[in-house]
Every structure is written in C-alpha cells, then in structure tokens.
Image (cartoon, grey):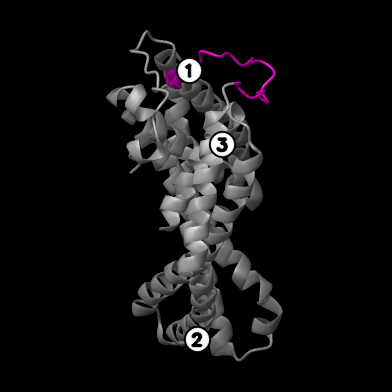
Amino acid sequence: MRVSSRRLRGALRDFMPYLPKHGLSVALKKIRDIADALGAVRDQDVAVMGLQKLEAGAPPEAAAMLHQLIRARETIRRQARKNLQQALHKGRLKQLQMDVETAIDSATANPKPAKRRSKNAEPHAEDTYREVARRTILKRLREVEKLSKGLYRPLKMEPLHRMRIAAKRFRYALELFEPCLGPDISIFVNKVGALQTSLGELHDSDIWIETFGKNRNGVVQQPKEQRGAALWLLSHFVRLHSKHLRSALGTWSEWEANEFGTRLREYLTQNLPVVVLPDDTSVSDQTVD
C-alpha cells in the first residue's frame, strides 16, 4: 500500500506540469499524509526485522543491546500503527477517493493545456502521451545526473539521500510510461532500480550510524561490556556502509562507462509508434502495477 501510494503520487507529479494543478495539489497532499503514516509503520517494520536478523548472529553483549533496541522499536511501531489506523479510517479513505477523482476529472476536462514550468517546453494542444513521457523521463534523468556529484562526497548523507529519491522518481516514470515506449525501456528500468537499491541500503546504514552516534555520550558512561557492544554495532554498520557505497559507485560507474544516459536519450528520439490517449479515457481504464 505504501508503494502504491508513492506510485500514485509519482504519476500525479509527472502529469501536473501539463494540467491545472490547483485541485491536484490538494489531492497530492492528502495522499502524502497517508503515505507518511504508512511509511512510519514500514520504517519500524524494516528496523525490527533487520535488528532481529542481526541479533541472531551477534555476540552476547551486542545481542542484549539489540534486544533492547528491538523492544524500543516495537513500542514506536505500536504508536505508529495507531496513527495509521486513524489515517485509514473508512470515511477518510472514501473522501480521499472522491477528492482525487474530482480533481482529476476537473483537470482533464480543461481543454487548454497549462503553462509548463520548463522554459524550454512550450505547451502544445496536440501533445501526445509519448511526448509527455519523453519530456518527463528526460527531466528525471537530468535530476539524477545532477545529483550524482554526491557520490564524490560519500561521507555526506543528505546529497546521496536526494540522489536516491531522484533515482526512485526516475524509475517510477520509466515504469509509468513503459507501455508507450516499448519493452526495451526495461533495460534502463533495471539499471536505475539497481542504483536505487544500492543508495537505499546505503541510506539505511547512514541512519543507523547516525543513531548510534547520537548516543555516544551515554555509551561512554556505560560499563565496559555495553561500550564494547556499541562499538561492535557501530563497526557492523560502518562495514555495511562501505559495502553499499562500493555497490552504488560501481553501478553508476557502469552507467557512465556504457553511456546509458546518452543511449536513453537516443532511444527516446527514435521513431517509435506514437500513442495518443483518447478523449474519453478514464482513470479506471488505466492499469498501474
């Protein structure tokens, strides 16, 4: 459900430059609120599962500390689930559905294309779905390329986090528009997916390292066994950080060596069949995985 909400937000975000955005902006915020509630639970699910797996192979003193961390995460998760239950109240979901449908009907009923934010892309009344796809994918590609400089500052977490988000949006756009670009686009989807995975696991390691770092003063004052456990855990996540960083660097190095960016741009300019959505196409006619 969390992934579905993200894909829905991604689709709305990709089409907003071509549609009146007032109603869509309100709908997008409501979807984001639910996505945040889902994400809060999912974050704790992932943390608990990861810590439980680590606990099974940790030395006794580290396992004891991990057990405490798991209990603390489970407490946080229980509260997050209560918040999620409120966000997913049947009445709220029904209202959200109505709001989204109304916003989309209103936006797509407007015969005049909205002014695009891009200075180099003037609106045209006969834009095809494929042309919208081409512009959107190129925009997402440029975002990832611009943020790739963060790989040259691997100890700074935030730039790599932004690159991860850009890679995710890039992959969602590729998958969203795949039906009108042909099956060969899946090559680029897989490459971007591998980059997103490496950056995601790297970010998780960064979060754990930062978490232990925030407690450093309390750890120093603890008994020798607990200090040793904290150092063991910190060392573990530093090793993971190095592993996932090497993976991300290797994936991006392959992307550049094989000129996937250039190849994708060339692919998008080929004379592929043009797909124009009929005027009466409704949301229910579209299938999104």
Magenta-colored segment: predominant secondary structure = loop
Tell me the magenta residue range.
112-131
Q: State whether residue 94 is above or below residue 59.
A: above
| SS of the residue under disc 1 | helix
Of all residues shown, which one is farthest toward the top? Answer: 271
Badge 2 vs badge 3, beta-carbon distance below 8 Å: no
Q: Residues within 10 Å of mark 3 (few under 14, many from 20)?
A: some
**Magenta stretch: residue 119 in it?**
yes
Q: Is residue 170 left or right of residue 216?
A: left
Three-letter amino acid code at disc 2?
Gln
**Callout in the foreground (2, 1):** 1
For image coordinates 53% across by 73% down, the residue present is 86
On the rendered image, what quadrant is the N terminus found in? bottom left
Residue wearing tag 3: 106
**Callout in the foreground (1, 3):** 3
Residue wearing tag 1: 131
